[in-house]
Image (cartoon, helix red, strand yellow):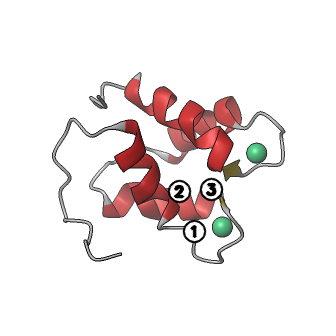
């Protein structure tokens, strides 16, 4: 992809933008995000969530219970994030 993630992300972003950014942190390219990958994503996006919140968001969005967020579950995850006051359009 031609664009890179800025140190600080300006909000609001669309759900698709957020999904796209998060999926770039799928380091091992298995098509889903582990807790570790998500934490790195948050950190690099300048969002400082504690691991408890990240864990809560993952378990809430993780519909099939495998401990990872896949592309389908990502929408749920992004919605959960928006409830924390992150304005996602
Ligand atoms: Ca992964
Ligand atoms: Ca899952």
> Where residue 38 is drawn, which disc sits there?
2
Residue at image mark 3 = 35
In the displayed structure, 20 sits above or below 57; it is: below
Residue closer to the observer: 44 or 31 = 31
Cα separation, mark 2 vs mark 3, equals 5 Å
* In the image: residue 82, left or right of residue 67: left
Cα separation, mark 3 vs mark 1, equals 11 Å
Q: Secondary structure at mark 3?
A: helix
The quadrant of the image that shows the C terminus is: top left
Of mark 3 and mark 1, the one earlier in the sequence is 1
Q: Position of residue 83 (x, y in %)?
A: 41, 22
Is ligand 1 within 8 Å of the beta carbon of the residue shown at mark 3? no
In the displayed structure, 67 sits above or below 25; it is: above
Whether residues under marks 2 and 3 lie with C-beta atoms below 8 angstroms apart, the answer is yes
Q: Residues within 10 Å of mark 1 (few under 14, many from 20)?
A: some
| 3 vs 1, front mark | 1
* In the image: residue 6, left or right of residue 45: left
| 1 vs 2, front mark | 1
Which quadrant of the figure shows ligand 2?
top right
Q: How many marks?
A: 3
Of mark 1 and mark 2, the one earlier in the sequence is 1
Residue at image mark 1 = 26
> Where residue 12 is drawn, which disc sits there?
none
Q: Look at 83% across and 48% down and name the residue there.
A: 66
Cα separation, mark 1 vs mark 2, equals 8 Å
């Amino acid at each position: 992809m031609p664009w890179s993630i800025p140190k600080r992300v300006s909000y609001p972003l669309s759900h698709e933008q957020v999904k796209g950014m998060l999926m770039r942190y799928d380091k091992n390219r298995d098509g889903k995000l582990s807790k570790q990958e998500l934490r790195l994503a948050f950190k690099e996006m300048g969002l400082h969530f504690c691991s408890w919140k990240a864990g809560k968001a993952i378990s809430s969005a993780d519909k099939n219970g495998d401990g990872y967020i896949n592309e389908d579950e990502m929408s749920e995850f992004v919605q959960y994030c928006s409830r924390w006051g992150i304005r996602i359009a």
